[in-house]
Amino acid sequence: MRLLLEEALLPDGWARAVGVEIEGSRITAVQPAATAGTRIAGRTLPGLPNLHSHLFQRAMAGLAERRGPTEDSFWTWREVMYRFLAALDPDDVEAIAACAMVEMLERGFTALTEFHYLHHAPDGRPYADPAEMAARIAAAAAETGIGLTLLPALYSHGGFGPLPATEGQRRFLCTTDDYLTLLDSSRRAIAALPDARLGAAPHSLRAATGEQITAVLAALPEGPVHIHVAEQVAEVEACLAWSGARPVEHLLATQPVDARWCLIHATHMTEAETRAVAASGAVAGLCPITEASLGDGFFNATQYTGAWGVGTDSNIEITAPGELRQLEYGQRLLHRARNVLARGPGRSTAEDLYLAAAAGGAQAAGREIGRIAPGARADLVTLRPGITLDEYVFVDGARAVDSVMVGGAVVVSDGMHRARGSVARRYAARMARLRG
């Protein structure tokens, strides 16, 4: 297949009349100032990777927007989440996952790194296949065509110490041995998906001990490793009380954090921690819309010089350009300035945000994606004719998406996913049962 892109965002910037050769699912050649190929009007971007999501939470969006009897926070939101997930069965999870994936594809994401921790039946007992829920996520990925990196989460404890888990966490819990079995089963669950990748996700320092993390790294010497860290002030205070160190400080001192790691949120870091994370080569996994929704705080973006990407986390709103816009606007509010994250005078803020998030998201996914370049997977997002990247990120948002290609296959045309109708009907039926 040979495409002729009217204008395309390449790793070194924009180019016109770009010829793109695709063999199978991969780009084999890129030629600016080309003349032959199937013409694609409008501006074409490399597909943006979504580096952090909890798919099942898409179905609870809007359920935690009433003020409680005490001051609301991440911790009160978490109790709403525990109550909601208690009723979910595997069919629910597959329907919710497919709906969220369709929305991701229609709204500018072409790959998903799923931080998956809903493992067991409502009573906490494992399913006959320990990876039953992971298999449902894989089935949704096959149906929708999104690229998948699956990160089964290790969740064993309820807090630093470690503390016992609560009843609301029973669907997540694994011993180290159980988790290693889950990894093997999850590998089989995604085996038929094209270009899928398996990684590990120690949920957090409060849910997995250092010894457990070390055991997981020994069992999985390659592939992405993601962990929630320093999302909340209360988490920082609890870690200090337990270990005498802040979460990021403790993680860097006790684990071999390097380029295969992604530190999710990393919101509350000192200047020294910020420099150390950048120097480690790890990716900072930012979820600006969720972090704003939960009142987490602001990432130290102006001092951070390392790799970063964006994710949708709670999926309260799924939008690739919206995550980038929220990141920049948060920094504008924090610093009372504009175009804070542009790399220099005359630079497009949207372009700098997009290229950085594409590169960091690809690294976090452990896949050759996020670039229009030879060897990369052919994941392309084309905007409606006349829409600039600045308008996509800061004005029109996801409604500017015209077509989306994943691995050389068109999955979105005229802004609509090929399976939207059937996926939406199944999701609506499941939601009627869950919220009825």
Image: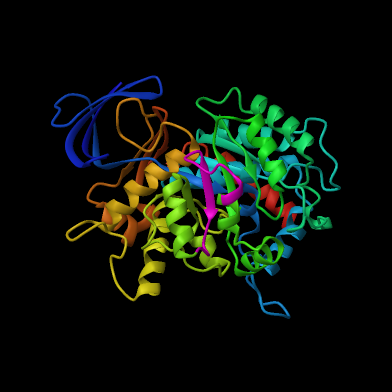
**Residue at image coords 75%, 48%:** 88
- Point out the image quarter for the C terminus: bottom right
Q: How is the image coloured?
A: rainbow
**Up-down relation of residue 64 to residue 413 (above or below):** below
Q: Quadrant of residue 175?
A: top right
Q: Is residue 274 left or right of residue 335?
A: right
Q: Quadrant of residue 181?
A: top right
Q: Is residue 341 left or right of residue 295?
A: left
In the rendered image, residue 268 lying in the magenta stretch gets the answer yes
- Residue 247 in the image: x percent, y percent? 60, 58
Q: Is residue 420 visible?
A: no
- Point out the image quarter for the N terminus: top left
Segment tinted magenta in the rendering: 253-269
**Residue at image coords 82%, 38%:** 126
**Up-down relation of residue 222 to residue 381 (above or below):** above
Residue closest to the eye, 8 or 386: 8
